[in-house]
Amino acid sequence: AQSVAQPEDQVNVAEGNPLTVKCTYSVSGNPYLFWYVQYPNRGLQFLLKYITGDNLVKGSYGFEAEFNKSQTSFHLKKPSALVSDSALYFCAVRDSGTYKYIFGTGTRLKVLA
Amino acid sequence: DAGVTQSPTHLIKTRGQQVTLRCSPISGHKSVSWYQQVLGQGPQFIFQYYEKEERGRGNFPDRFSARQFPNYSSELNVNALLLGDSALYLCASSTDSYNYGYTFGSGTRLTVV
């Protein structure tokens, strides 16, 4: 069965420093991977996706993610964190052969001024 | 353009009652999916509809049902509510059936007392 894991419940980073939010996946076949962000009392906002092609995917708000097939990882990164990036981040994989997404448990990012 | 709109935003129901949640997708989007997000967890897939046909169903009891209308809006119905149904219910729309990146609504917060 397809799954994603977000090993960190919370990540703290100082404003201006680079940030990484980790995600590993387990799929059969080609992975379709996604990152979403959720602000308090809001729905999820799409950040980026990997379907095929370049391993470095650029997305919204300066975020990018690196797809690593050998390590089955899809870590979210940003070169310089902003306080406004503080939110809950979800990694997701599309379940092959179905139409559903499987979400990780989420990582709370806190950017400290 | 309006995003994905959900109504109502908040709802309080009593155990045993029935509830209907509504979703209007982005104009031109023919695919609508429903997710349940319990506090502290990632969203869990409930249903996906494309062109008014059910394309996927998650591991939810038959108390949960949904439908999509000719204008692509959708309703999620939950019968015989349980306390455990308390959650944020998210609707997401997409341009195609493979959901290469949902756009989520802000959700309906359902509280069952």
Image (cartoon, grey):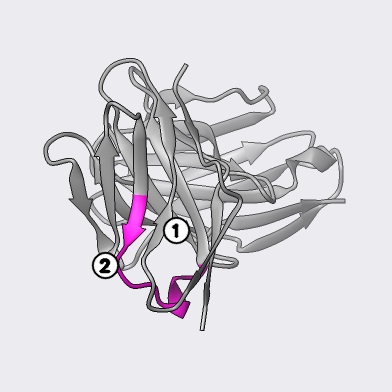
- Crowd rating for badge 2 (residues with CA inside 10 Å; few <14, some 14–19, many 20+): few
- Amino acid under label 1? Val
Q: Is residue A88 above or below residue A13?
A: above
Q: Residue furthest left?
A: A53
Residue A98 quadrant: top left
- Amino acid at dot 2: Gly
- How crowded pointer 1 is (Cα within 10 Å; few <14, some 14-19, many 20+) is rated as many
> On residue A37, which mark appears?
1
Instruction: Tell me the number on the disc at residue B32.
Output: none
Q: Is residue B87 left or right of residue B36?
A: right
Asked whether A77 falls inside the magenta stretch, the response is yes
Q: In this image, A87 relative to A27: left or right?
A: right
Span highlighted in magenta in the image: A76-86
Image x and y of residue A105, in percent: 58, 42
- Is residue A12 placed above or below B24 in the rendered structure? below
The answer to whether residue B104 is visible is no
Chain under disc 2: A
Report the side of A87 relative to B73 (left or right). Answer: right
Q: In what element is the residue under mark 2?
A: helix
Residue occupying the point 49% across, 31% down? B47
User: Residue at horizontal 42%, vertical 48%?
Assistant: B92
Distance between the alpha carbons at the discs numbered 2 and 1: 13 Å
Residue A90 belongs to the span the image colors magenta: no
Residue carrying label 2: A62
